[in-house]
Amino acid sequence: MAGGFGTRLDADREKPLVRVGGRPMVDRVIDALRASGVERVYAATSPHAPATREHVSVPAIETPGEGYVADLEAVLTDDRIDRPVLTVVADLPLLAPDAVDDVLAAHEAGSLTVAVPAGLKERLGVSADTTFDRTGREVAPAGLNVVGDGPDRTLVVEDPRLAVNVNRPGDLTVARNRA
């Protein structure tokens, strides 16, 4: 999912192309996916990210750019996509192949939402725009999910690499320091 403006980040380029560790975040995510057990990789881009669409080295799926839910619906209705499908946001620059493989191994059926403890995000000094209660524990979505047919379950992981979503300048500083 690489179609956002990145307005909260206040960057001089499209958010997926912001550099962490000397490389655009979207490249870091694509490389992690390619080195994992994922069979095919696509980039979901929107009219808000034309430079990202031109930049990526994988096939692109054009989305309307009307928000995450609308963009995800466009991906899920694309003829090239079969469920279950792993989705990941381009602003997760510390993603590593083993973390992807752990999520794939944890998926049994239906959909799987990956979350991290809100306290982990707080300790790392990164933002948490959305949180929810999971069995008495406040957690935040990681931006890595499996969308399938059937029931949804949540996997909570204590992995800092999945806790650093780059949405604000402070998040970018943390990502760059950890890359």
Image: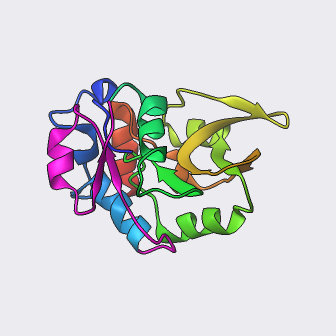
Q: Nearer the viewer, residue 63 or 177?
A: 63
Q: Quadrant of the N terminus?
A: top left
Tell me which corner region of the image, top left, top right, bottom left or bottom right, holds residue 31.
bottom left
Q: Quadrant of the C terminus?
A: bottom left
Q: Looking at the image, can residue 164 be seen?
A: yes
Q: Height in image: 136 above or below 38?
A: above
Where does the image place residue 40, in percent across and percent down from the top left? 41, 67
Residue 109, percent across and down? 73, 58
Instruction: Inspect the magenta stretch and tell me whether residue 41 lies in it.
Output: yes
Instruction: Tell me the chief SS of the magenta region.
Output: loop
What residue span does the magenta drawing correspond to?
35-64
Q: Nearer the viewer, residue 94 or 26?
A: 26
Relative vertical location of residue 12 with respect to residue 80 in this rendering, above or below: above
Quadrant of residue 64 in the image?
top left
The reply to whether residue 118 is visible in this rendering is: no
- Residue at 54% across, 71% down: 98
Residue at 21 percent across and 58 percent down: it is 22
Q: Residue at x 53, y 52 (%)?
A: 162
Q: Is residue 113 magenta?
A: no
